Amino acid sequence: MIFLGCILGMVVLTFFFSESEKERYNPNRDPKSLVSPHSIEIKLERNYLGHYIANGTINRYPVAFLLDTGATDVVVPASIVGKLNLKKGRAGRAMTANGAITIFETNIDHLSLGEINLYNVRASINPSMPSSNVLLGMSALGRIEFVQDGTSLTLIQKSF
């Protein structure tokens, strides 16, 4: 009986600390939108590494975005391209922190983060990207405003 109690206790602790670690890595797993007649705002919190990571969708498939103002395009790891219904286009070269790589052009029909929706977004497929996180680069971020204040970043999409 004591053995089963210990096993049950370990399972509960593992689950608790696993969820805690997920929250530390991505504090924006369910980003809340503030919708007004003139704009949509989402306030994101930095994770424990100092990055802004937030859940969203590409073509209605759930993804985790890593906001990257240094990336020209939205960059999608090749490992999830099939799930996102993206077509591999023309090959090209890109400079990354790890050197030059071959990438492929693609286009995202619909990208969403909270209530912010972007359509027809230029993107790149990176076959060398080990993470499943999608880099939310300037082809998307350039269409919205963003303001950093301390450890938070507010994304603002103006209504037309």
Image (tube, rainbow, N blue to C red):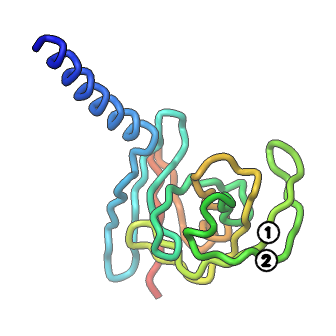
Task: Tell me, for residue 104, which label it has, or none.
Answer: 1
Residue ID for mark 2 = 89
Q: Position of residue 152 (x, y in %)?
A: 44, 47
Residue in the picture at 50% in, 60% down: 63
Q: Nearer the viewer, residue 43 or 86?
A: 86
Q: Is residue 101 above or below residue 41?
A: above
Q: Secondary structure at mark 1?
A: strand
Residue in the picture at 14% in, 18% down: 5
Q: Is residue 151 visible?
A: no
Q: Position of residue 114 (x, y in %)?
A: 39, 67
Q: Is residue 5 above or below residue 122?
A: above
Residue in the picture at 38% in, 52% down: 29
* Dot 2 amino acid type: Gly
Q: Residues within 10 Å of mark 1 (few under 14, many from 20)?
A: many
Q: Nearer the viewer, residue 141 or 127?
A: 127
Say if mark 1 contacts mark 2, CB within 8 Å: yes
Considering only order in the chain, which callout, 2 or 1, is on the residue closer to the N terminus?
A: 2
Asked if residue 155 lies left or right of residue 12, the reply is right
